Amino acid sequence: MTNNDILKKLRVALKLKDSDIVDILKLVDFRISKSELGAFFRKEDHPKYVECGDQILRNFLNGLVIHMRGPMPKKEKPLK
């Protein structure tokens, strides 16, 4: 299973639109356009197909955690 397949399956399972995925990636300061994102969802034999790299999938998953759970609370410094 490729990174593109994983991204497609998560998009369908979570009922995400392209704009939702762009917003999720913004949560981890990763910018991508809708047209760049659309290239990941094309068939492999399409001329504008682009392989989804590990960095994009990793950033999407990290952003998805923030999107679903919210940001991590800041830890308090222990008193000395």
Image (cartoon, rainbow, N blue to C red):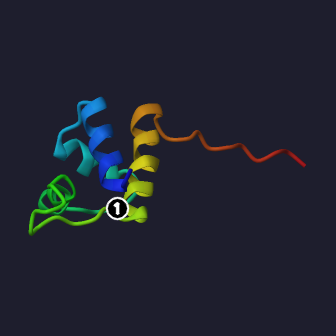
Question: Residue 79 placed where, x, y %?
Answer: 85, 45
Farthest-out residue, bottom = 47
Quadrant assignment, res 20: top left
Question: Residue 40 placed where, x, y %?
Answer: 22, 57
Question: Label 1: how many residues lie within 10 Å, few (<14), some (14-19) or many (20+)?
Answer: some
Q: Going 38% across and 50% down the picture, which residue do you hit?
A: 1
Q: Indicate the amino acid at tag 1.
A: Phe
- Who is closer to the viewer here, 31 or 42? 42
- Who is closer to the viewer here, 2 or 74? 2
Farthest-out residue, left = 47
Height in image: 23 above or below 31?
above
Picture mark count? 1
Q: Going 42% across and 33% down the picture, which residue do you hit?
A: 68
Question: Residue 42 placed where, x, y %?
Answer: 14, 55
Q: Going 9% across and 69% down the picture, which residue do you hit?
A: 47
Height in image: 5 above or below 44?
above
- Who is closer to the viewer here, 22 or 57? 57
Farthest-out residue, front = 45
Quadrant assignment, res 59: bottom left
**Residue where numbered disc 1 is placed:** 30
Badge 1 element? loop
Q: Going 18% across and 39% down the picture, which residue do you hit?
A: 17
Question: Residue 44 placed where, x, y %?
Answer: 19, 60
